[in-house]
Amino acid sequence: MKTIKELINESLTEVSATRDILRQQRISRVYKDYPELKEIDDQIVTVRNSRFIAVIDKDERLIKRYDIAEEELQAKRDRVMARNRIDPEFDMEKSICDKCGDTGFCKGSDGTVKVCSCRKNELEMCYELSGMGDYSSYKMKNYRDDYLGETAGRKRIRNELLKVMLGIDEEDNKSSLCIYSAPPQSGKTFLSVCVCKTAINLGKSAYYVKCEDLSTLGTDTLEALKNIDFLIIDDFADEVTLHNNVGSVLNSVLETRAAGKLTTVLVTPFPKSELISKSDMRISGKLSTAKLISSEGRK
C-alpha cells in the first residue's frame, strides 16, 4: 500500500514537467506575438555569454562594455513590455494550482492542513489502495445524525471516532485500541469508512479492512498495517478470531501497533464483555483495556 503523501510525492516530477511545458508554451506565444521582444532577449543572451568569456579573460574593459550593453537592452526590453502590456513574469515557471502551490496540501479556513482538491485522483487512488475501493460513494457529508431517530447517539459516536483518529483523548486513556460497538444496520461501516477517508484527507496513513480478510492480506500489506497512523478493522467478532489464523495475525498487528501507540478501532455489533469472554485468548487481554465507543459515549 502507498500513503497519500507517497502518492503525491510521486506525482511531483510530472507536475514539475507540466509547469515547464506550460512555461515554454507561454514564451512561444509571447515571442510569436512580439518578435521584437524575442530579438532583444536573444541579444541579451549573446551579451551575457560574451561577458562570461570576458570575465574568464579578466578583461575589465570588455566586462564594462557588456554591462552597459545589457543595461541598454534591458531598458529597451522594459519599454516593449510596458507598451504592449506583456506580463513581466511570462517567462517564469508558475504553479498550476494557486490554492496549494502544487504541494498537494493546503490550509483550510479552520487552519487544518488537508489534501488539496487538485489531488482528487491521488486521493481516490489512495482510498482504493487503503481497502476502500468498494466504497467510492461513502462520504462524510452524507452521514446523517438523525438516521433511525438516534441523533444524539450517532453524533456522539461520529465525534468520538474523529477525536480518536485525530489523537484527541480527553480521558488520557493509555490504550490506543478502541472498540466501536453499535447494533447491526446502524451505519457502522459507512461511518468507519468515512472516518478512514477523513484521516487520509488530513495526510495520515490509514487503512480499512474486514476482520475476516486479515488472513488473506499479503505480507507487505500486513507489515504496513503495523505502522500506519490509523487502522479500522470492521466486522470484528469473537468467532472470527478463532478460525483461519485470524487470531494470530490480528494479535501480531495489535501488539506492534500498541507498542507504537498507534490508534486501532475494532468495529463490532457485539458487546465488549462478550468479545472479551469468547475471543481468542491472545486477543481477550487486549480487549479488556480497550476504550469503548458507543452511543452512550466513550468508556
Image (tube, helix red, strand yellow):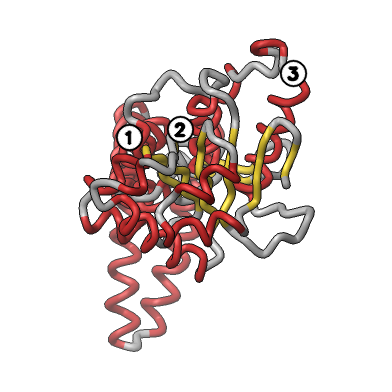
Name the residue at 39% across, 24% down. Answer: 135
In front here: 32 or 102?
102
Check whether the beta carbons of the residues at disc 2 and disc 3 lie within 8 A of each other. Answer: no
> Quarter of the image holding residue 175?
bottom right
Name the residue at 35% across, 26% down. Answer: 33
Residue that extends furthest to the bottom in the rendered view of this protein: 58
Give the crowd class for mark 2: few <14, some 14-19, many >=20 residues within 10 Å: some
Mark seen at residue 118: 2
Q: What amino acid is found at the position of numbered circle 3 in the picture?
A: Thr
Q: Where is residue 275 in the image (x, y as percent from the top left)?
A: 51, 45
Of circles 1 and 2, the one toward us is: 1
Q: Which type of secondary structure does the marked residue at label 2 adopt?
A: helix
Q: Where is residue 285 in the image (x, y as percent from the top left)?
A: 52, 61
Mark seen at residue 151: 3
Question: Which is nearer the N-term, disc 1 or disc 2?
Answer: 2
In front here: 127 or 160?
160
Q: In this view, does 288 lie above or below 26?
A: below
Q: Position of residue 177 (x, y in %)?
A: 56, 55
Q: Which type of secondary structure does the marked residue at label 1 adopt?
A: helix
Name the residue carrying label 1.
128
What's the distance in space between the residues labelled 2 and 3, CA to CA?
Answer: 34 Å
What's the distance in space between the residues labelled 1 and 3, CA to CA?
Answer: 30 Å
Q: What amino acid is found at the position of numbered circle 1 in the picture?
A: Glu
Question: Which is nearer the N-term, disc 1 or disc 3?
Answer: 1
Name the residue at 71% across, 52% down. Answer: 168
What's the distance in space between the residues labelled 1 and 2, CA to CA?
Answer: 18 Å
